[in-house]
Image (cartoon, rainbow, N blue to C red):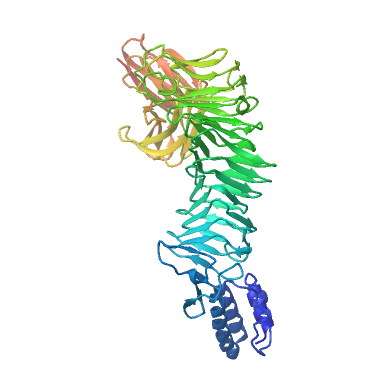
Amino acid sequence: MDSTFFSIILSKADDCESAVSADIPTTSISMTKLPAPPWSMTSYLLCTVKYFVMKTNFTRLLSFAAFFLTVLNLSAQDAYRTNVTDGVVSQWTTVGTWQRFDGVSWVAAGAIPTSADGVITIQTGDTIQLTGAASNISIDQVVIEPGAVLVIYLNSPSVTLNDGAGDDIIVNGKLYIPSGGNLIGTGNIMVNDGGQFTLRNSGILAVPLTNNGTMFLGAIGQAAGTILSTTVTNNDTCIWINGANTLSTNASFVNAGKMWVNIPANTNWASTGSNTITNSGTILNTTTFNLNVVPVFTNTGTLGGSGSYTFTNIPTNSGIIAPGASPGTMTVGPNTITGKTPSINIELFSDGAVQGTNYDHLIISNTVNITGATLNVVNTTTTADPINTTYTIITTSAGNITGPFATVNKPSNYTITYNANSIVLTKIAFFPLPLAWGEFKAVGQGSKVQLDWSTLMEENTAYFVIEHSTNSAQFTPVANVQAQGNSTYEARYKYTFASPDLAKTNYFRIKQVDIDGKSTYSVTRSVKFDKGQIVAIQAYPNPVKDVLTLNVQKENIQVLLADQSGKTIQRVNVQPGQHSINMQSLPTGVYQLAIFEKGVRIETKQIVKQ
């Protein structure tokens, strides 16, 4: 078999049909046209076996089997692994640190591994330093196992991470770039769940990094390093311990996870050149110090904590400003709010009404315009604070506040007051007003029931539960409908119940559930079926003392109430829904309730007046 066939197989693994369709003569086995490893041996083997089966050439199959085993051994020979005593720090540049796989077993390496080799594994328990190299070292396909450590530092020139075949650096253990460390190149770093990456002191990271584990910026007494001309993405946890972190020359930091800023002093998120920070997750300044952000900043996530934030460049902010750490005080510059559309979240946390201790407090450092912002107030107190307690939730340290907020979502037992340089909540009742129910109709439509209901006001309403019964005693939940949550206007909802009992009366009620789990019920409505047909009207209670309720299920219904002599007492046209006839002033006796549909009498009911 000639090398052309293998070149097709090994370079076209994703296009097996083109390889199979090629009728390539068998001549000799040549290795000259094979691509550089690694490749997916399973894919190539399956594709080639398919070729041989289709060509029904047993000689070719035997030739390939021998060839494949040879190639497999050649690819394995490129693998390196550490071979050092656990807990002993060893140098990458020391040949004795490494073992190499020769195709059969692991043997002492004859050279240190580089990007020209295959997978380089730092084994669990081993700590490797890549330091003091006399010349540039290129690495690739490095796997740091759980419990293993790689430290890249004090290198001149830099360490280059190549973007070759396979993964570039996979961190399941720990990777450090401390003082003097400089990692450049076109490769990528992936920090997996359970892995750790640390950038500190004068370390430079100049290759893309994605963190799905834990990332540390700085260390006690050490700065937080430099991110140079690359993108770092945090999807999980980033902890900023100390010192300035610098973005340089078109660098980007993307936070989609949670970032804890634990700085022990005022610190810069510095910038050299054009650089950006994008936050769609949560950044929490947990100290009382200021984080000054110099790169261009875009926030669609949450800025929170108990420290302060300033922005050299005017930020883009449509996210959340959440002062406190349940609770606390936080300071921001006015450019995070003026002309922006953020939400400001304030928590009334505990009784006592002490600013920053029992409830959140936002300080704005200068004159601010809040007319584009939304205020969200959540009350988690035990409500022991007396009526007329005030809570100064927002203040300015200089200048005035221009308001009001575009939207205010707050418990109904608090009022809001806008002052020149403060915003104050006042408690006017111990508890919020409950949800106010509007109308509720249950109307049969063919073999289904349409439920329509409304609320006149909602206060922290989470959702509605539709409940159904055929005996008016035992109800079963059948569906949930999301609520609007907070409103001071009529909100309408609907739900279609597709499986009523077509031979019985079906009862429906709606359970309203608040965010805190409290609930209330609507009135109960019913729809009666008789042999699959909707009963046009139900009249109850019967006997009746005061008010007769009509549950109307059909269009164009007319109802006539008459006494025993046939004298008409009341005539009314009704549509589907609930209606009533006041019988309180009528004498005791038996009355006739005639029901007409489109002018034709369809039923007469006897009503007993008590």
For the image, the number of numbered tags is 0
Q: Foreground: 464 or 78?
A: 78
From the top left corner, tell me how far across and down residue 450 is, in percent: 48, 34
- Quarter of the image containing the N terminus? bottom right
Q: Residue at x 60, y 54 (%)?
A: 182
In this view of the protein, which residue sits in the foreground, 96 or 165?
96
Q: Is residue 462 left or right of residue 187?
A: left
Question: Is residue 101 positioned above or below 380 on the image?
Answer: below
Q: Is residue 87 above or below residue 366?
A: below
Q: Quadrant of residue 273?
A: top right
Tell me residue 89's x, y (percent).
Answer: 45, 61
Q: Position of residue 533 (x, y in %)?
A: 44, 37
Q: Is residue 559 left or right of residue 590?
A: right
Eyeballing the image, is 422 above or below 468?
above
- Asked whether residue 484 is in view, the answer is no
Quarter of the figure with the C terminus: top left
Residue drawn at the location 61% of the way across and 26% of the way down: 337
Can you say whether 156 is above or below 530 in the image?
below
Which of 502 and 435 lies nearest the eye of the viewer?
435
Q: Which of the 4 image quarters holds residue 21?
A: bottom right
Q: Is residue 544 visible?
A: yes
> Residue, x 57% and y 54% (percent of image)?
181
x then y, percent, for residue 508:
39, 32
